[in-house]
Image: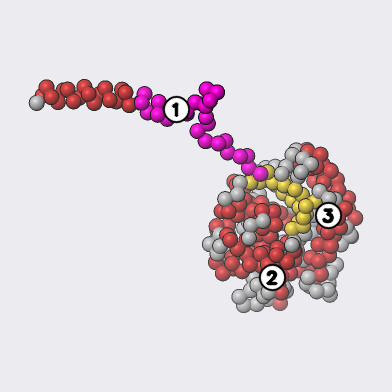
Amino acid sequence: MRYGHGIWSIIGSAALVVAPAATAKESAPAPTAAGAATPVAEQKAAPRTILFVGNSFTQGAHSAARNWGAGKVTDLNGAGYGGVPALFKTFCEQAGLDYDVSLETQGGKSLGFHYDERRQLFDRAWDVVVLQEFSTLDRARPGDPADYLMNVERLVKLFTARNPAVDIRLASTWTRADQVWLPKGHWYGKPVTAMADELRAAADRAQRANPAVKGILPVGQAWNRAFAEGVADPNPYDGIAFDQLDLWAYDHYHASVAGYYLSALVTFGSITGVDPTSLGPREKGGDQLGLGASQISALQRVARNQLAASR
């Protein structure tokens, strides 16, 4: 018996020596007709690159969205912001889309600032670029689109010089409650939708003047729709109605988590063509930022309806 046990030990050891060689032979790529090895798997396509240029409205300022998901995106200024770009990235991950997301932002600044002071950070080829202007277009002359039109043109020339096929989008932002409901506001006394609609008209003018601009992100119109459909309260100064969302932050100027979430949904749906409601009521970004499933669903529906109306 001892002898038999030794024989099987020798045979087992020999098998261990032979097995790796056999395995290597079996796993080796089959030669092609030319004698070269066939790749085991196709090389993964590079992700689409997207750049967000803007200010605090892109950063997600004055909300929990500002630094949320910062590790998912590249902040070209190293400030550690996540904001709308991080939500966009998160939506893409859940939809199975591969985007390499970067942002270059500065609170309270116009697009002219980014061109004059920061363009060395982003002067390269991008697949997609989102441009977001100062909330009133012009700080000194609210509603005046002159500088906006000039700066969109300058940035379009810069980006198309690097990639003639770049997909440039203009973010048309929301009505500021302080500009509509307070006497000091430029749009005081007008409907709550008026400011967003004027900003959209300016974006439309910029697109007509620059064919490389592929579309407008109708964020302000989605906010208007949220008011019209009873999803959000249009006047935060008289209290928030039961079961409605406040899209503004405490300053009634910047957005709340819900407001930035709606902005990101519109951005995602517009750029990718994916229905925002396909993300579902348990969407990770909204859930982690504290929105309830019914609130997430309602905001997704608003985004979907606005994108459908804007086509």
Q: Main secondary structure of the magenta part?
A: loop
**Callouts 3 and 2 close, C-beta under 8 Å:** no
- Residue name at image x 63 percent, y 39 percent: 46
* Cα separation between marks 3 and 2: 25 Å
Q: Along the polypeptide, which appears first: circle 3 or circle 1?
A: 1
Q: Name the residue type under label 3.
A: Gln
Quadrant including the C terminus:
bottom right
Give the CA distance from mark 1 to mark 2: 59 Å
What residue is rendered at 80% in x and 46% in y?
114
Alpha carbon distance from label 3 to label 1 = 54 Å
Task: State the residue position of label 2.
Answer: 226
Residue 28, label in figure: 1
Read off the magenta span: 21-48
- Within 10 Å of disc 3 (Cα), the crowding (few <14, some 14-19, many 20+) is many
Image position, residue 212 (x, y; %)? 81, 48
Question: Split into 4 quadrants, where in the image is the N terminus?
Answer: top left
Q: Is residue 90 visible?
A: no
Q: Pinpoint residue 4: horizontal percent, then vertical percent.
A: 13, 24
**Residue 34 on the magenta span:** yes
- The color scheme shown is secondary structure
Give the mark, 3 or 2, whose residue is nearer the N terminus. 3
Q: Earlier in the sequence, mark 1 or mark 2?
A: 1
What amino acid type is highlighted by mark number 1? Ala
- Which residue is at the front of the view, 86 or 13? 13
For image coordinates 69% across by 70% down, the residue present is 226
- Foreground tag (1 vs 2): 1
Name the kind of residue labelled 2 in the image.
Answer: Ala
Nearest the eye: 153 or 187: 153
Q: Is residue 214 visible?
A: yes
Left or right of 88, for residue 181:
right
